[in-house]
Amino acid sequence: MKSQRNMVCECFSFFSLLAKKSLVQTFLIINCLNMADVFIVSFAGRIPFAFLEDIHQRFVRTYGRAVFSALPYGMNDEFSRVLSQQMEYYSSDPNADRINRLKGEMSQVRNVMIENIDKVLERGDRLELLVDKTANMQGNTFRFRKQTRRFRNTVWWRNVKLTVALIILLLIIIYVVLAFVCHGITLPSCLK
């Protein structure tokens, strides 16, 4: 098995040789597969292709038209550092995969929304409980008013009966006193 340095050199020597052709990316992918085996196995397919696209853009941006006059293996020393850095970045940094990062952000937003919905539902449950308690209190208030009226009427009638009983008792006492003073039940001496 070749060392990583040799694979990087091979990859860029092929890249510098094939830069003149239209199928550079395809050949770069094919020739860099040995170098990126571990990278490809450990990540989803889109990360290695994003890596290769990034390397391609950096290579074209760095060397531009100089590729047409470059000697084989002529750019290995300069560009191997960039390749190693980018391999490290795409292998270890979670921000390298935009889709996973966006999925993570969407998952966070989804979790926040679920929490908010749970809070709203819980609040709705509390509101329903409050409405039920209010309706119960309203029913109790109606019953209390009815019982209060009934109790007030009962007390009023008791007072009326007591007043009538006292008046009758007072009249009886007055009659008894008059009967005693007037010497008889028919009040004979007082009526004359």
Image (cartoon, rainbow, N blue to C red):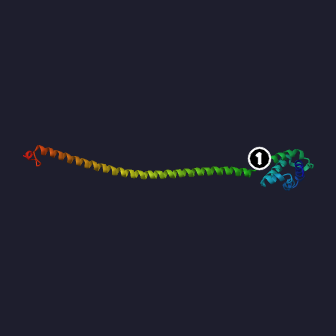
Q: Position of residue 103 (x, y in %)?
A: 70, 52
Q: Give percent across and percent down for residue 124.
A: 54, 52
Q: Hey, which residue is sitting farthest right in the picture?
A: 71
Q: Is residue 22 visible?
A: no
- Between residue 28 and residue 41, name the one nearer to us: 41
Q: Is residue 163 visible?
A: yes
Q: Amino acid at mark 1?
A: Asp
- Along the line of sight, the residue nearer the viewer: 109 or 135: 135
Residues packed near mark 1 inside 10 Å, few (<14), some (14 to 19) or many (20 plus): few
Residue plotted at (65% across, 50% down) = 109
Left or right: residue 95 versus residue 74 is left
145 sits left or right of 181 in the view: right
Please tell me how many numbered marks the rendered image carries. Answer: 1
Residue 45: horizontal and vertical position, in percent? 78, 55
Q: Position of residue 111 (x, y in %)?
A: 65, 50
Rendered residue at 15%/46% (across/down):
176
Task: Tell me: 122 left or right of 140.
Answer: right
**Residue located 82% across and 45% down the image:** 85
**Which residue in the structure is indicated by mark 1?**
93
Q: Secondary structure at mark 1?
A: loop
* 141 horizontally vs 94: left or right: left
The residue lying toward the viewer, choosing from 116 and 81, is 116
